[in-house]
Image: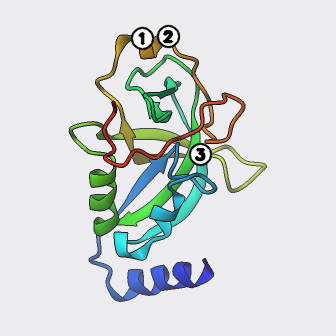
Amino acid sequence: MKGSVILSLIISVICPVVHMARVFVYGTLKKGQPNYFRMENTSNGQAVFLARARTVEPYPLVIATKHNIPFLLNVPGTGQRVYGEIYRVDQKMLEFLDRFEHCPEWYQRTKIQLEVQDGDAEGEKSIEEAFVYRKTTYESEWLQKPTYESYDANGDHGLKYVSPEDRSPE
């Protein structure tokens, strides 16, 4: 981990033209979750953990489909403030994440306001903006599902994540 952070700093200094974007992950791509290995795989691109954060606005985070996939529904003001992680990613990783999340067919990559949870414990929380993959089209009954403030594949919800081979919703 330390080596990848040092490499990230070296690349940032030597090649400042490399475009880096911030991405907020809230589901299976978080540390300790089933797809986190994809964030660490440098053949997918570069991803550097920046901070834990939560959404400024509430959103419904639901678990749906036969694969028990976590979805952040694009219904701001409904649900809960969702916890996740902010990463700085290079263009290659951003393109990988777009393919992995089937963007724009399945998810939409949009910007979201986040309250950073790490950092100075005394001071006020900083607000950052990052990309997030939100579900803009979904079954109407998904809005009746329980919402979560934090996703864990092995959580008390009892809905064990099943990795879909083709990443199709049904």
Q: Is residue 137 left or right of residue 134?
A: left
Q: Please identify the quarter of the rendering in which residue 167 is found.
A: top left
Disc number lying in front (3 or 1): 1
> Which residue is found at the position 41% from the left and 48% from the top?
130
Disc 3 residue crowd, few under 14, some 14–19, many 20+, Cα 10 Å: many
Q: Are marks 3 and 2 in contact (CB under 8 Å)?
A: no
- The reply to whether callout 3 and callout 1 are in contact (CB within 8 Å) is no
- Tell me, for residue 141, which label it has, or none: 1
Q: Left or right: 61 with respect to 125? A: left
Q: Where is mark 3, residue-wise?
A: 53
Q: Evaluate if marks 1 and 2 touch, with contact meaning CB atoms under 8 Å apart.
A: yes
Measured as percent of width and height from the top left, residue 110 is found at: 32, 40
Distance of label 3 from label 1 (alpha carbons) = 28 Å
Tag of residue 37: none
Q: CA distance from mark 1 to mark 2?
A: 5 Å
User: Within 10 angstroms of label 1, few (less than 14), some, or many (20 or more) residues?
Assistant: few
Looking at the rendered image, the disc whose residue lies closer to the viewer, 3 or 2, is: 2
Disc 3 marks a residue whose amino acid type is Ala
Judge the density around disc 2: few (<14), some (14-19), many (≥20) Cα neighbours within 10 Å. Answer: few
What's the residue type where badge 2 is placed? Gln
Q: Residue at x 53, y 24 (%)?
A: 58
Q: Nearer the viewer, residue 1 or 131?
A: 1
Q: Residue at image x 37%, y 41%?
A: 133
Q: Nearer the viewer, residue 170 or 148?
A: 170
Which mark, residue 144? Answer: 2
Q: Is 62 rendered above or below residue 53?
A: above
Nearer-N-terminus badge (3/1): 3
